[in-house]
Image (cartoon, coloured by chain):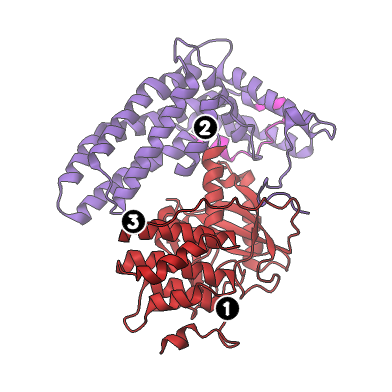
Chain colours: A purple, B red
Amino acid sequence: MRTRFFRAAMAAIPFIFAEAAAAQPGFDAIERADLPACAEGGAWVRDAAVFTYFKDGYYDLDKRFRAFSGTAGSRISAAAATADNEARAESFAFLHSQVAGLIPRLGRLLPRVERPLDLASMAEQLRKGEIRNPRGDHHTEYLRVAFAREMLNAPASVAKNPGSSLAGFLDSLAVVENQLLALKNGGDEDAEALRRNLQGLSANYRDGFRPIAKHVIFASYANSLQGRLAFGVKEICDAQAMCANADADENLCGEGGDEGEKVGGGAHD
Amino acid sequence: MTEKDQTDDNAYTPLEYLAVLPIDFSMNPPEDVNVESVCIALSVHPDVFVRRNAILGFGHLARVTRKLDEALVKPIIEAALHDKEPSVRGNADAAMDDIEHFLGWKFKRAQLPDMPPAPRYIRTETAYRVYVVMDEESNILVERHDLPGVIAPSDKFAPDPRGLSYGYEWRLPGFSLMRPLSKKAATLEALWKERRRKVWINESNEFDESAIAQSLTLKGAPDHAFRDWLEIKCRAYLCDRDENVWSPEKGIAQRWLTAEEFMEGFPVGAHDRYVLALFRNFMTGR
């Protein structure tokens, strides 16, 4: 059943998404749209602007990643060689801001990723091949959960083990970010180890993350990207609707609820 | 000040101060105090916290001064390994590690008795909310009474109003859930709930767990007594440092610590360290 709110939101979609298509890249239009994620079974996902959003998101990340990885090696060498502590810290601060800036851009493609701390948890989900359902209300999280699950399903011709490849990229990104943060703050990280980790990060991007993301966004298989994501969002919404039922199967839906899991000294009354 | 003054346990000596004393002295031994004697005197104190810190003080002294009277101290630590309180036994074991490492002594390392089983039911007396507030670079917000120039440990700091840590220890933002929330506590609770509607919901912002712990301190908390069981409902909130989501009260100093500083470099309350350990476990072990 459509609510008055939803009718207003749906009526605004063509205008909002037209703006998104015109602006290059125009992430705000989709990110700031006030859309109930599951309204009409997630029909809004079929809009072509969703494809534009992921395409632009990918190129934005790719461009910045290459800008970072292409120059970071020489910058690290130069910074490590300088005797001026302030200049060295400044160089590492610049590199750190570059790599930290990649994380929210990666978060356009993966759910719940905005900060360095978020990387380990997402890597674990990718490694296990289990992207958790949306935890918040925002429609973009639904999109990203569906997109991340599409990436896990990339064929063997693209990646033998997509989950491990994607997780490896996130792990190496977290390591490099952490090392640069330490160096920026005057820590005694080994610049040579950082250079090696940087090479690993570039390889994990080139051979792992990049081909998988490109395949999901650009390869024409099964359906358009929006069509596949719309199916994924509908699956999430259907599962949520089923689990909202009081008689929901706990095995399928978990315990749910907003309360924290009890840890520590055992049961209490 | 005489040695007797230092160790005189009478009605005017707060137990909390006595518990801090051996740690305070052994980590920064004053020139005019025989710290070894202080620790020896307090190592048989009837209070478990005083006793266990006195035993731990020997380990600190070994590290800091590289000098202890083996004939006097060794039997005390070996006896503490059989203390009826598990925490004293644990500290004796830790002190032995330090002394073996720094002084090369050899102890009779008896097998530690098993820890008592966890109780099946625990009645908690009160509940606190504790927030791990983190900035853009994962630094952690902590606060304590503002006393420039006073070096911790010291009993000059005002007590933790949550009663979860010693006054001199840095602590996480937190408040009692048994009393009406202050304006800033209500604001932080509202911000945390609102995070679900943000575009950039974080994996790390999902941390929302509950720990059961025993009160360690005597002062500061109106809602619980020494050694009561407490529920610590802990959450993480990621913010930009400029957002100032938990502004300091008058007379309170705040700092942003790295995780390493929080766990090792700075004096931080044991319960607060436990909360960060839970957070790390949550982030890496799920």
Q: Amino acid at mark 2?
A: Glu
Q: Nearer the viewer, residue B147 or B215?
A: B215
Q: Is residue A40 magenta?
A: yes
Q: Which label belongs to residue A237?
A: none
Q: Amino acid at mark 3?
A: His
Residue B154 coordinates in the image, percent (x, y): 46, 77
Magenta span:
A26-44
Marked residue chain, label 3: B
Check disc 3: other Cα within 10 Å, few if <14, some if 14-19, many if 20+: some
> Residue placed at 50% from the left, 71% from the top?
B144
Q: Which label belongs to residue A124?
A: 2
Q: Nearer the viewer, residue B277 or A87?
A: B277
Residue B208 coordinates in the image, percent (x, y): 63, 49
Which residue is under mark 3?
B101
Q: Is residue A168 left or right of residue A128?
A: left
Which residue is under mark 1?
B15
Q: Nearer the viewer, residue B250 or B244?
A: B250
Decide which of tag 3 and tag 1 comes sooner along the chain. 1
Residue B234 coordinates in the image, percent (x, y): 62, 54
Real-space Cα separation, disc 3 to disc 1, in angstroms: 31 Å
Real-space Cα separation, disc 2 to disc 3, in angstroms: 38 Å
